[in-house]
């Protein structure tokens, strides 16, 4: 999802299409999950995100057992990638907290990341395996540490051909403008010169960028490529 307040100016359609394709590669990893809503251990709804609401009888929770152990048991019993147990009254309390993330002064990325964090940190939620990490937190930290304004250059080659050359402006730790570099560099040496004029930037192969965007920790994966600017 692209925040609506990012100005996108003179973007090359092929380069932008490639970026969207690379970013979407992570989205095509379906995770089958079992979500169980319970009232202090009494199951009131069970949903398999692949098939919908489960037919009765719904799975039972052992009131004497640890809920984490119960989530682990249900995950194995139903053969899913993740099981989530949500306590009903706690969900009602969580709703108010989630609504507060919609503060008009909050930007969209911050709101979405805060909502995700509140959900997994809520005592009403128990899951197996452990909650997924915030993949983009390291990237947000790096951007927040940049001077304001700052410029970022990202250039990806497909072999010897420049497939994407983008420049972004960062203000107060957030991407404010994105544009294509025209004309694009014809060699990695020329690309490195462009990076040298920016606050930071990267020159890498399309395949490396694909792997970084699909990784559990995109920033660490990007750094591991040894790309210029890391």
Image (spheres, helix red, strand yellow):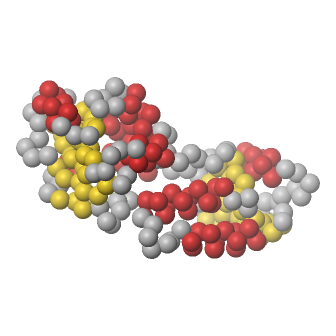
Q: Residue at x 23, y 54 (%)?
A: 178
Give the farthest residue toward the right.
Answer: 64
Q: Is residue 38 above or below residue 135?
A: below
Most foreground residue, 88 or 94: 94
In the picture, residue 95 is in which quadrant?
Answer: bottom right
Q: Residue at x 11, y 41 (%)?
A: 184
x then y, percent, for residue 13: 17, 54
Asked if residue 38 shows in the view, the reply is yes
Most foreground residue, 77 or 105: 105
Q: Residue at x 16, y 28 (%)?
A: 188
Most foreground residue, 99 or 209: 99
Most foreground residue, 25 or 139: 139
Q: How many marks?
A: 0
Q: Is residue 108 left or right of residue 156?
A: right
x then y, percent, for residue 67: 81, 53
x then y, percent, for residue 219: 42, 38
Q: Is residue 179 above or below residue 112?
A: above
The quarter of the picture where the N terminus appears is: bottom left
Asked if residue 139 shows in the view, the reply is no
Q: Is residue 159 left or right of residue 226?
A: left
């Amino acid at each position: 999802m692209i925040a609506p307040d990012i100005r996108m100016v003179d973007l090359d359609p092929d380069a932008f299409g490639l970026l969207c394709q690379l970013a979407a590669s992570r989205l095509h990893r379906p995770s089958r999950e079992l979500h169980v809503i319970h009232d202090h251990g009494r199951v009131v709804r069970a949903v398999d995100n692949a098939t919908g609401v489960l037919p009765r009888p719904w799975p039972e929770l052992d009131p004497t057992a640890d809920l984490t152990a119960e989530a682990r048991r249900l995950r194995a019993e139903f053969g899913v990638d993740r099981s989530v147990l949500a306590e009903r009254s706690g969900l009602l309390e969580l709703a108010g907290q989630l609504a507060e993330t919609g503060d008009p002064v909050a930007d969209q990325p911050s709101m979405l990341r805060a909502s995700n964090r509140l959900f997994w940190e809520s005592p009403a939620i128990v899951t197996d395996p452990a909650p997924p990490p915030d993949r983009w937190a390291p990237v947000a930290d790096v951007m927040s540490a940049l001077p304001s304004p700052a410029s970022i250059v990202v250039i990806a080659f497909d072999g010897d051909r420049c497939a994407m050359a983008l420049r972004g402006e960062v203000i107060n730790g957030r991407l404010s403008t994105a544009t294509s570099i025209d004309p694009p560099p014809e060699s990695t040496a020329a690309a490195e010169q462009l990076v040298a004029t920016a606050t930071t930037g990267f020159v890498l192969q399309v395949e490396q960028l694909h792997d970084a965007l699909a990784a559990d920790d995109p920033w660490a994966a990007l750094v591991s490529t040894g790309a210029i600017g890391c």
